[in-house]
Amino acid sequence: MADKATRTPRSRPPRKWPSMAEVAAKAGVSSQTVSRVANNHDNVDEATRARVLAAMQELGYRPNAAARALVTGKFGAIGVVSFDVGAHGNARTLGAIADAAREAGFSVNFMGIRAQTEAAVRQAFRHLMLQSVDGIVLVESQMLDTTSLHLPPTMPVVVADGDTGHQYPNVDFDQASGTQSVVSHLLELGHRTVHHVSGPRDSFAARRRAETWERTLVAAGAPVRPTLYGDWTPESGYLAGRTLAQMPEATAVFAANDQMALGVLRAMHEAGRSVPGEISVAGFDDVPEAPFFEPPLTTVHQDFDVVGRHCVTLLLEQIERRGNGPRRLAVEPTLVVRASTAPPPA
């Protein structure tokens, strides 16, 4: 007799999921009605829909995505690939994509990746395609050469916050307009020049803002001081701010995002430099906390909800093959002037 400890355990039979016919019997309707409810069709009265949904939940029914795709031509899901999901802009954009997709009757499958490489992006795409998605939004906050990505040609793709080289539909803020507005605001207050705390070198948004900052100063005949680089965090802004605090000639600072501006404010406070009495500080993004900084922060407002919704709109146009929509949508940011900026000291 075999020792109990060495017995090979019996494998459990695979779970049998309830069929559409079983749901129909439970709800007292036809299988066609169950199919219409599963595919979110409108031609079902609300009482019947509620009864079918209750039967689905009670039985644990799971619609077959492949079968549904044969009927509707769609799986009813979109994928989203993003790098830094903790960043304010990315988090807001992802939330707006999820809201817009749900309103359109689509679910969202999300894939976060840490490695900022083309290979990681392609692997994420392959993973999402195995999950049967109808299209994918790439929130490309890091610089990638999208001309060499070679993404699946049959998969609808929209890129947010990235330079697609016109290869894929793109949604982004007009970074140049937003940056020009805040730098011009500081120059118009009478500052001789504006120092800049940039985001990381591998960021599209940081690069565009830095380029426009320099271009705006040159156009105004203002001297261009060396750029200080951060990594979007308050700590990196604080370190840059400590350097700027030791420069008496610095009277205005433009930080490439509000979190770094917060760090600059802390550094100025510690150094005893009054904001905005001695030095003006401005940011970019208009995070919810910006009005509550001390002092309240002048910044550039970006409507990430609009970006997310535009991404879904462009993706659905491809999925449903509705015309040839715009290849690029630029969302206009707006300058928000608060108490952190003022004319330079006399």
Image (cartoon, rainbow, N blue to C red):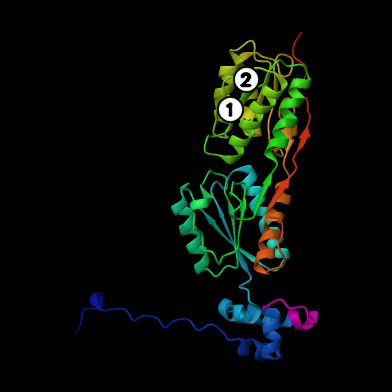
Q: Up-down: is 225 above or below 156?
A: above
Q: Secondary structure at mark 2?
A: loop
- What is the residue that sits farthest to the top in this orientation? 346
Is residue 43 rendered to the left or right of residue 250?
right
Residue at (64%, 34%) from the top-left corner? Answer: 209
Disc 2 crowd rating (10 Å Cα; few below 14, some 14-19, many 20+) is: some
Which residue bears the numbered disc 2?
224
Residue 255: x and y in percent read 64, 28
Residue 96: x and y in percent read 69, 54
Q: Which quadrant of the figure contains the N terminus?
A: bottom left
Q: Secondary structure at mark 1?
A: helix
Front-lying residue, 280 or 226: 226
Q: Is residue 306 visible?
A: yes
Which residue bears the numbered disc 1?
237
Residue 6: x and y in percent read 23, 76
Is residue 122 rendered to the left or right of residue 45?
left
As shown in the figure, which amino acid type bears the numbered disc 2? Answer: Val
Q: Which quadrant of the figure contains the C terminus?
A: top right
Front-lying residue, 169 or 236: 169
